[in-house]
Amino acid sequence: MGFLGADIRDHLSQTERLVQSTASVDQSAAQQIGSDLQVGGRFMELTGGCLCKAVHYRIAEAPVTARACWCRMCQTIGGGSGTVNALFNTTALTVNGELKEFKFIADSGNVMYCRFCPTCGTHVLVTSQRRPHFTAVRVGTLDDPNKVSPESTIWTSMAPTWAAIDPKLPRLDGQPPPGRSTLPS
């Protein structure tokens, strides 16, 4: 890992220990959403970073899920629209470059850690105190955002009346269960 602040390094270190002891992933969801990321049965690595290129990341496995989100925090970050986030096992992510952290309480009640580039301000990653074994990556920061697409839209109850929500995706009024696919069975 490249240079990160001491608090973030400590938090990620604690996260890695927790992941080793508690992580459970809906593998069928990861396989389903990650099927387009495979070539000859092997996962194609995902890469991305911030606007100014001071922060780079690599992801070594397919996402657990990906969702468009209309919670108030995502609307604020998105400048009025929602955000699209892909959820990964934290241990699959390698970050190079400095990230600053902003701690806040989400609409779900979770304590969240939003990580962003201190130079350009791009929001890159989000983790939750309740589920640190997962990290959400802002899909717009992927080098090729077409490689991951949302499988559902969440927090639609908070979306403005003019929100452009894909009618083909399942909708949830609030937060889905942690780390689970929101695809219909």
Image (tube, rainbow, N blue to C red):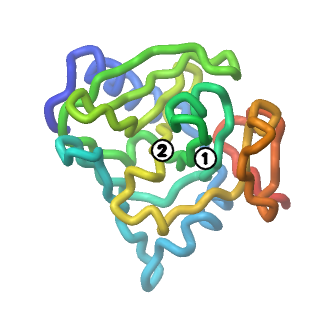
Q: Quadrant of the N terminus?
A: top left
Residue 143, position as x, y percentages in the image: 34, 61
**SS of the residue at dot 2?**
strand
Is 16 positioned to the left or the right of 147 in the image?
left
Amino acid type of the residue tagged 1 in the rendering: Val
Is 69 positioned to the left or the right of 18 in the image?
right
Q: Which residue is mark 1?
A: 25
- Asked if residue 8 is positioned above or below residue 136 in the image, the reply reads above
Pointers 2 and 1 in contact (CB under 8 A)?
yes
* Residue name at image x 81 percent, y 48 percent: 171
Mark 2 neighbour density, 10 Å: few (under 14) some (14–19) many (20 or more): many
Is 85 positioned to the left or the right of 123 in the image?
right
Q: Quadrant of residue 29?
A: bottom right
Residue 80, position as x, y percentages in the image: 59, 36
Is 17 positioned to the left or the right of 182 in the image?
left
* Residue name at image x 38 percent, y 39 percent: 124
Residue 106, position as x, y percentages in the image: 62, 20
Q: Which residue is mark 2?
A: 89
Q: Distance between the Cα atoms at labels 2 and 1?
A: 8 Å
